[in-house]
Image: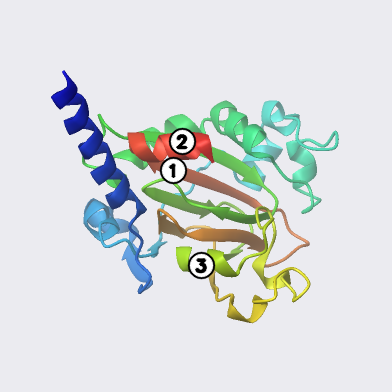
Amino acid sequence: MIEWILILGIIFIILIVFYKQANEEFTILQLEGTQLATLTTVISEKNPIVLRQIQIPPFFTPEAIQQNKRIQTFPLVQQKTVIDALTDSTVHTTTESATILARESGLQVWAEHTWFPYLTNWTFVHSMKTFANCGEQGLRKTTASSTIIIPTSNPLDIYIMTDSQEKFFPPSWKGKFPETFTVLDTPLVGQVKYMVIKVKAGNALCLPAHWFYSIRSSDSAKPVLWCLLECHHPLSALAARLD
């Protein structure tokens, strides 16, 4: 019995080591929507991937929301609703409300059928988590083996950084925007290196685990709607719960 516990413990440690591995030297890859059948192979390289000419969730566009009264009245922050997000780019979802909105809008079911088979060859081991988001979002770190960001309205400016940049961050970095860091936030602000990728509706960005990202709108006068899809294996799902 003790031997089996030791074996399982060793296997768990090995899995953690593989999960923690991140690619510090990277290349931005591109993949056409017609090539999604090869996505699992490209994902294994652990590079950011721009996906071009892909299907967007048809039920989470400004036009679709204007026709869906049930979604329009979904509550967000400060007594605002989803319909308010179409005219006020400062209205945003929380993680909790984005999760519920994904379920209520149909994003969860759509992603499981449309994207999940392309993200893993081991669907019986992996799981899908989705978020229907309104508004900009400050820094977060990916935990899923694959995280896909899909704009459904206004083009997004997606700021991305490798795991190695965290040592230059201020102590309270979550939810902040890296381009606004000053020497008052962190004395090593000049060492913070990020890249901005512009992604429009019809395209998407796929990030591997352990990358930092934040979301900005390219036009604050227009609605900011986007979907987040996460493909988790058991270890990354645990990491996400602990985050």
Q: x%, y% of residue 205?
A: 45, 59
Q: Is residue 20 visible?
A: yes
Kindly identify the residue that appears in the image at 21 percent across and 38 percent down: 11
**In the rendered view, does 76 fall on the left or right side of 207?**
right
Quarter occupied by the C terminus: top right
Which residue in the structure is indicated by mark 2? 129
Locate residue 8: give its quadrant. top left
Cβ–Cβ under 8 Å for marks 2 and 1: yes
Instruction: Note whether 161 is above or below 84 in the view shown.
Output: below
Q: Amino acid at mark 1?
A: Glu
Quarter occupied by the N terminus: top left
Which residue in the structure is indicated by mark 1? 230
Q: Amino acid at mark 2?
A: Lys
Front-lying residue, 215 or 26: 26
Foreground disc of the pair 2, 3:
3
Q: x%, y% of residue 63?
A: 65, 45
Q: Residues within 10 Å of mark 3 (few under 14, many from 20)?
A: many
Query: What's the CA distance linking mark 2 and mark 1?
Result: 5 Å
Q: Residues within 10 Å of mark 2 (few under 14, many from 20)?
A: many
> Residue at the bottom extreme?
190
Which residue in the structure is indicated by mark 3? 161
Q: x%, y% of residue 33?
A: 34, 57
**Sequence-wise, which precedes: disc 3 or disc 1?**
3
Kindly identify the residue that appears in the image at 48 percent across and 58 percent down: 202
**Sequence-wise, which precedes: disc 2 or disc 3?**
2
Locate residue 53: give its quadrant. bottom left
Kindly identify the residue that appears in the image at 46 percent across and 44 percent down: 229
Locate residue 194: give its quadrant. bottom right
Query: What's the CA distance linking mark 2 and mark 3?
Result: 22 Å
Q: Amino acid at mark 3?
A: Met
